[in-house]
Image: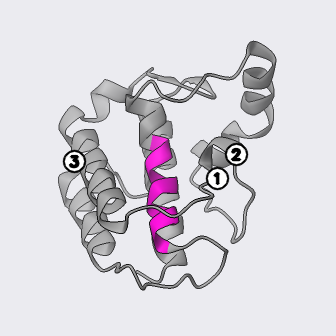
């Protein structure tokens, strides 16, 4: 798994993002490119911005039990995988706004560095290792950038 905390890797990811245009079509799935960018931003909103409600204790327990390993492992996501309700983007978004937000979040992640994420609480899974955060961030981005052919 690539290391999203590494500036070189982050720059490679942002170069892929830069290849997207408002007209880029997915190779699979139903999201438009602006919705995909907004969808990818949700992961970072949950890490940095207090705008998504935390699940209650029972839901968090179930997420840790049934979903966590899929999200934080190095195993790639399958095409057309189911997503959590908070990640569903139903309306159109402004492509350039979402693209800039994603690039800013990636830069912030590099700036804060791996040590910042060691033991940091996840909205859904509780404390994660820096490696688990990396896998979650990088794997999700790689999955959707591949979905859009970049």
Labelled disc at residue 88: 1
> How far, Cα to Cα, is label 1 from label 3?
24 Å
Stretch of the chain drawn in magenta: 33-43
Closest to the observer, 29 or 116? 29
75 above or below 124?
Answer: below
- Residue at image position (69%, 72%) is 79
Helix, strand or loop at mark 3: helix
Residue 95 visible somewhere in the drawing: yes
Which quadrant of the figure contains the C terminus?
bottom left
Labelled disc at residue 67: none
Residue 142 visible somewhere in the drawing: no
65 above or below 76?
Answer: above
Find disc 2 in the rendering and name its residue: 84
- Colour scheme in use: one colour
Labelled disc at residue 107: 3
Q: Position of residue 51 (x, y in %)?
A: 48, 28
Question: In the image, which is nearer the foreground, mark 2 or mark 1?
Answer: 1
Figure quadrant of residue 77: bottom right
Is tag 1's residue or tag 3's residue first in the polypeptide sequence?
1
Question: In the image, which is nearer the foreground, mark 1 or mark 3?
Answer: 1
**Left or right of residue 44: residue 87:** right
Find out whether residue 36 is within the magenta segment: yes
- Residue at image position (75%, 57%) is 82
Is tag 3's residue or tag 2's residue first in the polypeptide sequence?
2
Q: Position of residue 85 (x, y in %)?
A: 70, 44
Which quadrant of the figure contains the N terminus?
bottom left
Closest to the observer, 38 or 133? 38
Q: Where is residue 66 in the image (x, y as percent from the top left)?
A: 80, 37
């Amino acid at each position: 798994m690539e290391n999203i905390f590494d500036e070189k890797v982050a720059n490679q990811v942002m170069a892929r993002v830069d290849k997207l245009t408002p007209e880029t079509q997915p190779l699979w799935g139903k999201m438009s490119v602006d919705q995909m960018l907004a969808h990818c931003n949700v992961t970072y909103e949950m890490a940095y911005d207090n705008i998504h409600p935390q699940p209650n204790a029972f839901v968090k327990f179930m997420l840790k039990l049934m979903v966590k390993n899929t999200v934080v492992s190095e195993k790639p996501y399958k095409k057309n995988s189911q997503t959590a309700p908070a990640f569903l983007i139903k309306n159109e978004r402004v492509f350039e706004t979402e693209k800039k937000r994603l690039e800013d979040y990636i830069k912030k992640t590099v700036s804060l560095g791996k040590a910042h994420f060691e033991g940091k609480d996840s909205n859904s899974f509780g404390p994660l290792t820096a490696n688990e955060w990396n896998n979650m961030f990088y794997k999700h981005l790689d999955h959707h950038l591949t979905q859009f052919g970049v």
